[in-house]
Structure formats: C-alpha cells, structure tokens
Image: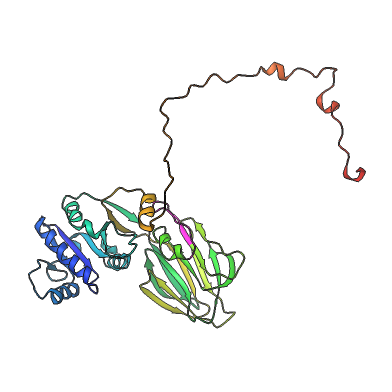
C-alpha cells in the first residue's frame, strides 16, 4: 500500500522552498510519495524552473483521506495553517522548524534527512493537543463559530481607547476592568501569546484552560488556570463606544461592537502532533527559549541506603499518670490577666 506524506511549505520564503524540494526528493528515495497542494507546488516549480521534483497534487492525484502524515516545513504559523486543513481528518502533523522559536515543531532544518528516515520507519508517536471551541454572540444572536489550537485573543480595536470588559467563569461574573485585551488559551498556547502577556507556562499533558488579561488597569487582573470543563466568557461592556477585535491563532479575525460576548469551551476535536523525540517538556523549554541552567547539579541519587533504628515508643501509662500533688496541669497554671487588667 502506498504511503503518502503531505508536504506543507511557507513558499514565500526561499529557505522553505529549498527545504520542500529536498524533502520531496528524500521522501521519494525512501519509498514514500510526497504530496503538495497545487499552489505550493506551482510556487516551487516557478522558483526552481523545472517540473522534475516528484510529487502528487492534492485534489488531483489524491485526497486528504489518503494521507498518512503531514510534514510541515516552517515555523509555528505554518503548523497552525496546516492544522486548519487536516484537523477534521485526524492527520498528524510533524513540524520541521525553519522559523525562530518554533515551539510546535519537532525537528530542526539540519535534521531534515533524519526526519524523513523516522517517517519512513514510522518511528514516531502521535499526541493529541487540546483545542478550544469559540463562539461570538451579539444581541442574543450567534454571529461566529470557530476554533483555535493556541488561543483566542480579544484585543482593543483602536489604539487610543481601552476596552472595558467583564470576565466570566462557569456562568458567573468574576471581575470587570479596562484593558488592552484578554487571551483565552490552551496549554499548547501557554507558550505563545498568553506567555507574552504574562501567563503561566502549562505542560501540554495538563488539561486546563487559561485566561490572561493584557495590560489590565485593575488591582485584580491575574492570569487564571481553570478546569478544562469550565465555560469561559468575556463581554465587551457598553460603558464606552470602544470596539474590539478577536483573533484565533493569529489567523482568523472578527471585529466586535460594544456588547459582544465571546464564549470559549474545550473542543471535542484535538490536533494531532507527531513526535520523534521523547524529550521531556522541561528540556524543550530550555532548548527553545535558551534558558540558563548553569550550576544545576541534578537529582541526588542515594548510593548506599541509610539504616534507621526503631523509633522509640512512649508508654501510654506514663502519659496517664496524675500530676504530683493531686492537681492537674490546669490547676497549677498561672492565670493570664485579661487585657482590661493590664
């Protein structure tokens, strides 16, 4: 049975075009069939001036349901774009980072040939990342329904005006304030916009939702970590005529009038990411953010077990003996004067 690998590329960048061509050649030499969408395939042909790179065309030679895995060449933005295409088909994505941090990517550009070999041997595991369901309501009518892998961010529409919002958790108001916006994120998105807004880093396997205010003018406007079963909401108040805009994963947006309401819940459909390295998330944090770890000595491993003796036990009868003189402790104690006698 033929194994088809869908190659995604950021064809607006020269490095990505070169990586896409190399990936297609490596996949072919490994007995796999590279597939590209027509526009990206045409961009690659125009750049190299030839049609010799062996690929099939998505929608012409095959469909999404015939794809085993998506190989994404680019940064996190390219992976988010690929997720929009394959999420409903449950195709796993394996990212090769050509961007900056590339937190969602599994491999680096220098590992491209090794990555193809891992794919050919099926030497990868698939993990599911939580996504969120996003609904927008205006005057009691739902006007938008979408989803996000990283976050949905409510932001002010005008630079000159703060947004007045009220935050809600599980159908109860929490607090209202003026701000530049609010980020509602998944654990995957905790290292994206929510991180820049001062939110906590949440390990991907932790099931939770985040609410992170952006530049809030309030005493209580701290990042919140809530249950994945919670229903989050943010309303744009009508105290002012300031408009807002929401962005889902920085890719899909909608302008919001005063009075608009955004509701966020956990989605039933995750995004599947392929992993070739069983690297602890803490190690990924250190690597991606280049965190300093000098001075770390590591966990203490006990070479020889330390023997402990038997813990002495006090005879209860000793504790029950009466106080000498026939009086108990309370009778011997000196009374403490009350404050009015001091």
Q: Quadrant of residue 264?
A: bottom left
Residue 335 appears anywhere in the view: yes
Q: Which residues are magenta?
A: 197-210
In the rendering, at what x and y percent does residue 32 appear? 12, 58
Q: Quadrant of residue 4?
A: bottom left
Return the residue nearer the eye: 66 or 55: 55
- Residue 174 is left or right of residue 257, and the answer is right
- Residue 221 is left or right of residue 73, and the answer is right
Q: Residue at x 41, y 54 (%)?
A: 291
In the rendering, at what x and y percent does residue 35 appear? 15, 65
Q: Residue at x 44, y 25 (%)?
A: 305
Residue 63 appears anywhere in the view: no
Q: Residue at x 50, y 57 (%)?
A: 225
Return the residue found at the far left: 52
Query: Which quarter of the figure is the N terminus placed in?
Result: bottom left
Q: How many numbered marks, from 0 up?
A: 0
Return the residue nearer the eye: 249 or 147: 249
Query: Which quarter of the figure is the C terminus placed in?
Result: top right
- Residue 182 is left or right of residue 69, and the answer is right
Considering the whole magenta stretch, tell me its main secondary structure.
loop
The image's colouring method is: rainbow
Q: Residue at x 49, y 63 (%)?
A: 198
Residue 191 forms part of the magenta stretch:
no
Residue 205 forms part of the magenta stretch:
yes
Return the residue found at the far right: 341
In the rendering, at what x and y percent does residue 316 appear? 68, 18
User: Relative to 142, is 131 above or below?
Assistant: above
In the rendering, at what x and y percent does residue 186 appear? 42, 60
User: Relative to 115, is 264 above or below?
Assistant: below
């Amino acid at each position: 049975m033929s194994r088809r690998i869908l190659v995604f590329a950021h064809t607006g960048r020269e490095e990505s075009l070169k990586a896409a061509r190399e990936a297609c050649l490596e996949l072919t030499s490994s007995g796999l069939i590279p597939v590209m969408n027509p526009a990206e395939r045409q961009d690659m042909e125009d750049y190299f001036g030839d049609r010799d790179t062996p690929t099939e065309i998505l929608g012409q030679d095959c469909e999404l349901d015939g794809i085993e895995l998506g190989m994404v060449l680019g940064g996190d933005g390219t992976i988010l774009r690929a997720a929009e295409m394959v999420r409903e088909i449950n195709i796993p994505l394996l990212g090769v980072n050509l961007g900056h941090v590339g937190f969602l990517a599994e491999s680096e550009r220098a590992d491209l040939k090794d990555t193809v070999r891992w794919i050919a041997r099926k030497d990868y595991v698939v993990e599911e990342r939580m996504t969120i369901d996003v609904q927008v309501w205006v005057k009691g009518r739902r006007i938008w329904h979408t989803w996000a892998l990283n976050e949905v961010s409510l932001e002010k529409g005008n630079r000159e005006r703060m947004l007045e919002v009220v935050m809600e958790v599980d159908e109860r108001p929490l607090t209202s304030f003026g701000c530049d916006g609010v980020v509602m994120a998944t654990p995957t998105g905790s290292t994206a916009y929510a991180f820049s807004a001062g939110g906590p880093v949440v390990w991907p396997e932790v099931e939770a939702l985040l609410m992170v205010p952006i530049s809030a003018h309030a005493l209580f406007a701290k990042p919140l970590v809530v249950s994945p079963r919670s229903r989050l909401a943010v309303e744009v108040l009508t105290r002012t005529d300031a408009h807002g805009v929401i962005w889902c994963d920085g890719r899909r947006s909608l302008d919001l009038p005063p009075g608009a309401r955004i509701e966020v819940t956990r989605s039933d459909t995750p995004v599947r990411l392929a992993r070739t390295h069983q690297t602890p998330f803490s190690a990924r944090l250190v690597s991606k953010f280049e965190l300093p770890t000098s001075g770390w000595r590591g966990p203490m491993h006990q070479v020889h077990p330390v023997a402990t003796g038997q813990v002495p036990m006090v005879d209860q009868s000793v504790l029950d003996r009466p106080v000498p003189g026939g009086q108990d402790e309370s009778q011997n104690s000196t009374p403490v004067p009350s404050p009015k006698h001091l």
